[in-house]
């Protein structure tokens, strides 16, 4: 079996009205973000699906497609696959026949599009072997993965209104975006009133609580609410000492959104967080999750308001990680007009079911793909 064709489709799927921000915060910007849908086709007629993150350029996608042409997905060693380069690798002569790499050389350049193709290869391999993708990564520890409701920056009134919708849909908590200048205490009060005492809240300012002085002061105001699950990335992550100080000064747990093994190592060494929101490729997530588990840290899988193929990959790897018990960021069709899946992921009661079919267990909705396709 070998890959004989690659189909690349550039799509743009708008967000649903009233799904992200209150009107006073303006357009959320997600509707203008394009993505690539990847289809790897073998000589046996199998199709492996992948989806890029936002902001990945076409050149990177086409370079990866060329690198996989003619390869057998069941015999690929992903660590040795050509994945592109940058100026620094060119300067040291990585591409020269005179360069002799050591066996322990770890500085291989990684293409920004490689995660989508890794996903598609795992989808192909699972379909060829007749097993779900999680079986190729250690097998699922659980059949359902906890997930939360989500929204962007909201007025307290809107936060309460959306929370009532979340409860009606069966969610047990939510994650909200905000910043220091937002009415965070009033937002939390409205959410607690609408959701009840057992409804959890993850506060995610994307580093916009700025400094320990502001972040700790706000945390002290929110300590009376047992609903606050954690602060995620309250301050700039370049200074992990700030995070350790935050942990010393407040009882509210703090989470770091991380994507690389080296970042996970540094956070563990610095004792900088209670929880981790992990991302990266499917293989990378499993590696990082194991490192966090060794340190006794609970995790969830993050997202970038993605479409269905990426979200399916998140569900498979989340199911593999024993310490992935915190509610993740899989929204299905909650945020965007469509997820491009023929059958949406099964989300109910604050959990998403792991797709049981071979590979990622999802198929494309061809009509939707054509509807949202960009020239």
Image (cartoon, rainbow, N blue to C red):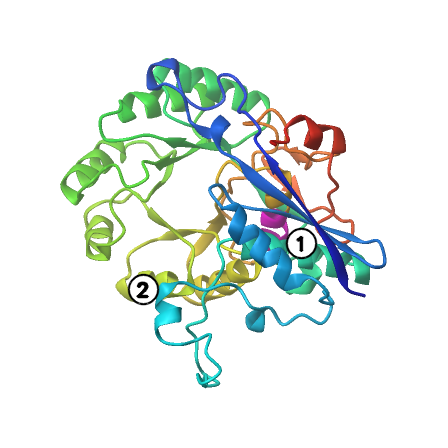
- Quadrant of res 322: bottom right
- What residue span does the magenta drawing correspond to? 313-319
Quadrant assignment for the C terminus? top right
Find residue 159 and report its horizontal and vertical position in percent.
Answer: 40, 20
Task: Measure how far apart labels 2 and 1 are at the Cα level.
Answer: 31 Å
Q: Residue at x 52, y 32 (%)?
A: 172
Find residue 188 and report its horizontal and vertical position in percent.
Answer: 34, 25
- Quadrant of res 69: bottom right
User: Callout 2: 10 Å neighbours few (<14), some, many (20+)?
Assistant: few
Side of 312 where 206 appears, left or right: left
Q: Residue at x 20, y 40 (%)?
A: 210
Quadrant assignment for the N terminus? bottom right
Q: Which secondary structure class fits the magenta region best? A: helix
Q: Earlier in the sequence, mark 2 or mark 1?
A: 1
Q: Residue at x 24, y 54 (%)?
A: 238
Q: Is residue 112 above or below residue 94?
A: above
Disc 2 is placed on an element classified as helix
Q: Is residue 278 above or below residue 327?
A: below
User: Callout 1: 10 Å neighbours few (<14), some, many (20+)?
Assistant: many
Image depth: mark 2 or mark 1 in front: 1
Find residue 161 and report its horizontal and vertical position in percent.
Answer: 45, 15
Q: Which residue is mark 2?
A: 266
Q: Nearer the viewer, residue 285 or 158?
A: 285
Q: Which residue is mark 1?
A: 120
Side of 250 where 340 appears, left or right: right
């Amino acid at each position: 079996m070998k890959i004989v064709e690659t189909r690349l489709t550039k799509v743009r799927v708008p967000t649903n009205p009233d799904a992200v921000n209150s009107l006073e915060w303006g357009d959320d910007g997600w509707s203008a973000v394009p993505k690539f849908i990847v289809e790897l086709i073998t000589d046996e007629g199998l199709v492996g699906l992948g989806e890029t993150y936002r902001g990945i350029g076409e050149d990177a996608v086409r370079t990866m497609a060329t690198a996989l042409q003619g390869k057998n997905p069941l015999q690929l060693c992903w660590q040795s696959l050509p994945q592109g380069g940058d100026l620094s690798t060119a300067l040291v002569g990585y591409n020269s026949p005179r360069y002799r790499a050591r066996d322990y050389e770890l500085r291989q350049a990684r293409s920004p599009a490689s995660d989508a193709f890794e996903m598609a290869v795992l989808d192909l391999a699972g379909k060829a072997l007749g097993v779900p993708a999680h079986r190729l990564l250690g097998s699922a520890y659980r059949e359902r993965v906890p997930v939360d409701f989500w929204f962007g920056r909201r007025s307290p009134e809107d936060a309460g209104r959306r929370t009532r919708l979340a409860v009606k849909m069966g969610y047990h908590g939510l994650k909200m975006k905000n910043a220091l200048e937002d009415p965070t205490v009033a937002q939390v009060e409205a959410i607690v009133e609408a959701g009840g005492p057992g409804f959890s809240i993850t506060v995610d300012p994307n580093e916009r609580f700025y400094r320990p002085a502001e972040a700790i002061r706000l945390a002290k105001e929110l300590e009376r609410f047992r609903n606050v699950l954690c602060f995620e990335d309250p301050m700039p992550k370049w200074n992990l000492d700030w995070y350790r100080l935050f942990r010393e000064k407040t009882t509210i747990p703090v989470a770091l959104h991380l994507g690389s093994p080296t970042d996970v190592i540094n956070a563990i060494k610095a004792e900088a967080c209670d929880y981790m929101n992990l991302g990266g490729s499917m293989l990378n997530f499993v590696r990082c999750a194991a490192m966090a588990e060794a340190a006794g840290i609970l995790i969830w899988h993050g997202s970038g308001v993605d479409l269905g193929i990426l979200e399916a990959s998140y569900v498979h790897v989340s199911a593999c990680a024993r310490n992935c018990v915190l509610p993740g960021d899989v929204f299905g069709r909650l945020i965007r007009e469509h997820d491009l899946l023929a059958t949406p992921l099964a989300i109910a009661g604050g959990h998403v079911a792991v797709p049981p079919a071979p590979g990622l267990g999802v198929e494309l909705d061809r009509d939707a793909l054509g509807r949202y396709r960009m020239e």
